[in-house]
Amino acid sequence: MMTAFMMLPLLGVLLWLYWFFLPARAAGRWQLFDVLLITGLGSLAVAFQWILRKVNWNNDGALWFEIVSMTGTYAIIAGGLAAGLIWRRKR
């Protein structure tokens, strides 16, 4: 839950950058690909969080789970948006 609150401002900035760097002919126009990409990345991030909840964190610090979850979630979302942007610009 904490990861979701910490990711909201970052997600807003990443989505704005994705929209800003869309090709000129499609700027400001979300397509079905964009909606599916964002939905898929959100699902992957939730699945990542679910898998992390199953890991045994007994000998680690209290914040270790939050650090790992934020890093992984950021990598999933930023990497996926970058790949989607590259794919949209080549089309």
Image (cartoon, grey):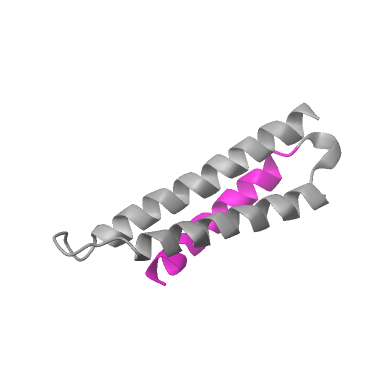
The residue shown at (79%, 43%) is: 27
Quadrant of the image occupied by residue 63: bottom left
**Left or right position of 74 against 39:** left
Specify the farthest residue to the top: 90
For the C terminus, give its image quadrant: top right
Specify the farthest residue to the right: 25
Is residue 47 visible to the viewer in this orientation of the structure? yes
Quadrant of the image occupied by residue 53: bottom left
Percent across and percent down for residue 29 are 82, 49
Q: Magenta part of the protein: which range?
A: 1-22
Decide which of 35, 12 is in the foreground and name it. 35
Does residue 70 sit above or below 82 in this rendering?
below
Percent across and percent down for residue 65 are 29, 60
Percent across and percent down for residue 22 are 73, 39
**Left or right position of 19 against 2:** right
Is residue 9 visible to the viewer in this orientation of the structure? no
**Left or right position of 37 against 42:** right
Does residue 12 sit above or below 24 in this rendering?
below
Q: Would you say residue 86 sits in the magenta stretch? A: no
Question: Could you tell me what secondary structure mostly forms the magenta stretch?
Answer: helix
For the N terminus, give its image quadrant: bottom left
Does residue 81 sit above or below 38 in this rendering?
above
Decide which of 58, 76 is in the foreground and name it. 58
Specify the farthest residue to the bottom: 1
Decide which of 26, 78 is in the foreground and name it. 78
The residue shown at (37%, 60%) is: 52
The residue shown at (53%, 44%) is: 78
Q: Would you say residue 10 sits in the magenta stretch? A: yes
Percent across and percent down for residue 38 are 66, 54
